[in-house]
Image: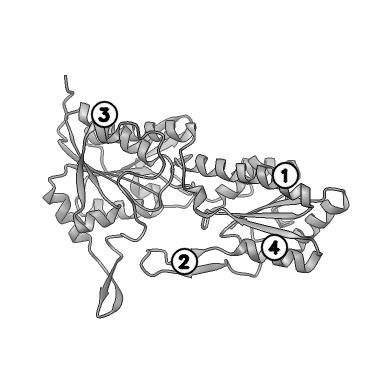
């Protein structure tokens, strides 16, 4: 017997970068939706599909067995912002507003609601589309864990696991060859992946965007360890880390993206500076998209499922303009406009920072 709701047809999309747990959310939305008598339309390639009209109906068979699968069966894109749409005009890329296309397909598909899974950028788009009249429920996804309104986003735990396992492996080769091993991780302007991955992996130095570092502090730490007979060091550096009076290292820019800056290269810079100024041998590993791929951890599978089922519950009750959020051990919701009001960054009072300092981790500065 099907339960009753006034919401008959919903859309679901996965926006921004991929990460482990997206399929678990899709599953967590689709199965309960069918029990409530709803039709589910999967919008392909994130907001690109919304602007271009790419969607397909999802049935239970489509989401069977996808709990443990990484990525997203719907496809995603971080270049499909309807309000910042790249379009080639006369051989030149122009940025256009194609939000009316999204509204056209929302209405044309007879959607009663949209469940949008994504990070900070996706939630900003959702807030604008809500103001255009769409009924939206947001689900927070980002390996960066930089959404203030939720204690944790799914995907972060899986990324941290990849970082900590990589550092475990670098420990053995670093100690064998007596090298300074540097691992560069993602996170953009927030240092949560580097902080938690570095702490879990036993890094000796953790460098974050929130705490501009001193070159001398880094040199002193690795030389001191060497003099104490600890003939290797592990440095976990966030891609957005920067020296005092310096800038983030920008790998490339892409105007098709809402945020055109692509970070990368700080690890190589640190490796060269350490070699040149201390004489110690260094090696650099850039984990890159390894942090986004693969099967979600058990924690992320559970969190994703909770988020998905809670999101469809909100939609069935007509509670729109809200984002699912984790508070303590309980899943709740907040207004989307509140969720995007502030980015969650690492601070000196963050418990993980305090614990890391207590066990001798350096953050490359004497000011903490």
Front-most of residues 343 and 200:
200
| Residue for point 30% across, 51% down | 126
For the residues bearing labels 3 and 2, Cβ distance under 8 angstroms: no
Give the answer, above or below, for where 113 lies relative to 277: above
N-terminal label among 2 and 1: 1
For residue 199, what is the image quadrant? top right
N-terminal label among 1 and 4: 1
N-terminal label among 3 and 4: 3
3D distance between C-alphas at marks 2 and 1: 34 Å
3D distance between C-alphas at marks 1 and 3: 47 Å
Give the answer, above or below, for where 279 lies relative to 89: above
Residue at label 3?
Answer: 32
Residue at label 4?
Answer: 271
- Quadrant of the image containing the N terminus: top left
Give the answer, above or below, for where 222 lies relative to 327: below
Q: Nearer the viewer, mark 2 or mark 4?
A: 4
For the residues bearing labels 1 and 4, Cβ distance under 8 angstroms: no
N-terminal label among 1 and 3: 3
Q: In the displayed structure, does residue 357 sit left or right of residue 96?
A: right
* Secondary element type, mark 2: strand
3D distance between C-alphas at marks 1 and 4: 18 Å
Mark 1 closeness class: few <14, some 14–19, many ≥20 residues within 10 Å: few
Mark 2 closeness class: few <14, some 14–19, many ≥20 residues within 10 Å: some
Q: Can residue 169 be seen in this view?
A: yes
Q: Position of residue 354 (x, y in %)?
A: 68, 43
Q: Nearer the viewer, mark 1 or mark 3?
A: 1
| Residue for point 30% across, 31% down | 64
| Residue for point 46% across, 38% down | 296
Q: Which mark is residue 261?
A: 2
Q: Where is residue 142 in the image (x, y as percent from the top left)?
A: 44, 47
Q: Residue 172 carries which label?
A: 1
3D distance between C-alphas at marks 3 and 4: 51 Å
């Amino acid at each position: 017997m099907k339960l009753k709701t006034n919401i008959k047809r919903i859309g679901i999309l996965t926006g921004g970068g991929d990460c482990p747990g997206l399929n678990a959310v899709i599953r967590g939305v689709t199965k309960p939706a069918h029990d409530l008598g709803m039709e589910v339309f999967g919008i392909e390639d994130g907001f690109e599909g919304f602007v271009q009209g790419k969607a397909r109906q999802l049935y239970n068979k489509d989401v069977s067995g996808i709990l443990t699968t990484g990525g997203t069966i719907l496809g995603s894109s971080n270049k499909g912002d309807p309000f910042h749409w790249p379009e080639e005009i006369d051989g030149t890329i122009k940025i256009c507003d194609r939000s009316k296309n999204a509204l056209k397909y929302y209405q044309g598909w007879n959607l009663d609601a949209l469940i949008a899974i994504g990070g900070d950028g996706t939630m900003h788009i959702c807030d604008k589309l809500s103001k255009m009249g769409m009924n939206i429920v947001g689900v927070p996804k980002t390996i960066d864990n930089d959404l203030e309104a939720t204690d944790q986003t799914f995907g972060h735990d899986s990324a941290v696991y990849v970082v900590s396992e990589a550092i475990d492996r670098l420990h053995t080769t670093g100690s064998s060859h007596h090298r300074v091993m540097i691992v560069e991780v993602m996170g953009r302007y927030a240092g949560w992946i580097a902080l938690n991955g570095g702490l879990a992996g036993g890094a000796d130095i953790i460098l974050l965007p929130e705490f501009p570092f001193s070159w001398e502090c880094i040199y002193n730490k690795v030389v001191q360890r060497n003099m104490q007979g600890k003939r290797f060091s592990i440095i976990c550096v966030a891609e957005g880390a920067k020296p005092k009076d310096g800038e983030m290292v920008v790998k490339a820019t892409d105007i098709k993206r809402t945020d055109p800056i692509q970070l990368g290269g700080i690890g190589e810079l640190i490796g060269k500076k350490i070699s040149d100024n201390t004489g110690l041998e260094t090696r650099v590993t850039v984990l890159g998209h390894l942090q986004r791929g693969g099967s979600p951890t058990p924690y992320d599978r559970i969190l994703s499922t909770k988020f998905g089922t809670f999101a469809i519950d909100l939609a069935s009750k007509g509670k729109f303009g809200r984002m699912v959020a984790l508070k303590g051990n309980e899943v709740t919701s907040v207004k989307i406009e509140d969720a995007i009001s502030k980015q969650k960054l690492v601070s000196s009072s963050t418990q993980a920072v305090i614990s890391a300092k207590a066990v001798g981790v350096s953050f490359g500065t004497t000011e903490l």
